[in-house]
Amino acid sequence: MRGDYSYTTNVLRKGHTRSEIMKTTMKTLARDEKGAALLLAIILLLVGGLIAAPLLAHMGTGILTGEVYETRTAELYAADAGVEDAVWKIQHQVDVPTGCSNDTTRSYNITDVNGRKVTYDITRANNVTLTYRVVSTATADGSGTQIEAYVTGNVTYCNLMDHLITVQDDLTPQEVKKLGDQIAKLDIPCPTGCTECAVCGKAYDYDSDAYKNMPQECKGCIAVYNFPSAGWPKVNNISDRYWEDVATLNASSQSSITLDGNSIVLGPLKRLGTLTISGTGTVTLNGTLYITDDTKINGKNDNDPILLRLNGNTVFVNSTTPQALEITQCTLEGPGVIIAVGDIKFWPKLTGGMDAPIFVLSVLGTTDVQPSGDIYGAIAGKVNVEIASGSAPSATYPEGGFGNLTLPYSVEFERTYSIASWEVTPL
């Protein structure tokens, strides 16, 4: 205290004010805090040193992880490019395995995708369901990614037997109305499972959205037109097919067969000319009837008709005339197929049911339908319906289709593929 007092006294003696004395005192005290900033800096350095190492390690891990991620992503895209290339080949059926015993797998490579080499295999895994197995691998600098995918196909065939009535021509609105009027003459019940009864008895454009969006169950009770030409039988093709059934046979010399109350078994038969079957009796087919000229199957009268049992066989008449095939005063029993290149006069008495459907096709002409009894089956080609008398007969598409009763001529109309599975494996 003495020192302080002397100092104050000396200052006052020199004429300093008391405020000046306080400023001088504060500066003196401030000088006594030298080194405080250094201490703060040292503390910060210590804290920084403690967190720098883990932070740098985390950043390094992030950089390495990012590089690995980028590498794997590039490999994934490269391997996927191989799968896409394989799918394109499969869709377009270009350079793909045929499925034969010595051609089930083929290998391909792409030299550079994202700096990676891509190799892939296409294996025909199943010939029935058109299933392919694709294995695509992308590699670079000891690293790799593999994708295994299964590609399945779905083939739609043009089938004339899928509808109650099928017409090839692209009809005008007036012709569509006429077709609608024709089928309106028939009593057409809805198939089992059809919930869209409004569609029954109407004609639909095969290429229209209305047809494509229709429930499958309902397609059996409608008429379609503008059927794809690729699916319509060519005369030569269908003729060649049925010719195979009779090619080794000697041609029949009989131009007429008269039944006198007898029952005969007929077929396979090759007749190069006209053929008439008449009288009263029963004809049971035991094979294909191949006839090259006008054919008539006419009973004695409506009270004494011929009973023609198709027995699962086909009557094919390779004639283009307006009188190519006539079936009148005849009781017709299915199942079976009746085909003529030209016009068909189809006036039989029909018997049978769902298990005995009959399919009728006029390849180039018109089928004139005047049935006695209900129709179980389908008709293809231009059609003209006449009702002789009484109530309209019913026309029923067979439940479940025609079973084993198929046309020998169907054409692939559309083929689509989809990826059923897709699995990635790092190598």
Image: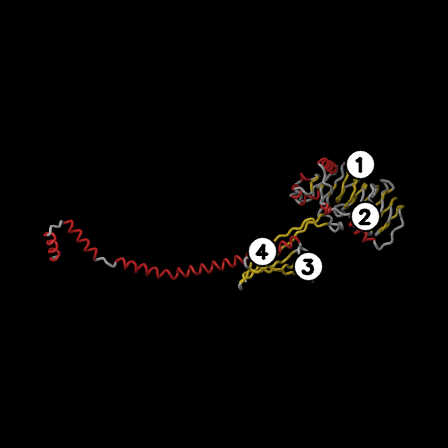
Q: Which residue is mark 3?
A: 99
| Figure check: 353 above or below 250 | above
Examine the image and state in which quarter residue 361 appears: top right
- Residues at marks 2 and 3, CA–CA distance in whole angstroms: 35 Å
Q: What residue sits 68% from the left and 59% below the top?
A: 99
Callout in the foreground (1, 3): 3
Residue 403 can be seen, yes or no = yes
Q: Which is nearer the N-term, disc 4 or disc 3?
A: 4
Callout in the foreground (2, 3): 3
Q: How many marks?
A: 4
Residue 397 image point, x, y percent = 73, 44
Residue 325 can be seen, yes or no = no
2 and 1 marks in contact (CB < 8 Å)? no
Quadrant of the snapshot with the N terminus:
bottom left
- Residues at marks 2 and 4, CA–CA distance in whole angstroms: 52 Å
- Residues at marks 4 and 3, CA–CA distance in whole angstroms: 24 Å
Q: What residue sits 80% from the left and 51% below the top?
A: 240
Q: Which is nearer the N-term, disc 1 or disc 3?
A: 3
Is disc 2 surrounded by few (<14), some (14 to 19) or many (20+) residues within 10 Å?
many
Q: Is residue 18 left or right of residue 251?
A: left
Q: Which residue is mark 1?
A: 388
Examine the image and state in which quarter residue 360 appears: top right
Residue 309 image point, x, y percent = 81, 48
- Residues at marks 2 and 1, CA–CA distance in whole angstroms: 27 Å
Q: Which is nearer the N-term, disc 2 or disc 1?
A: 2
Callout in the foreground (4, 3): 4
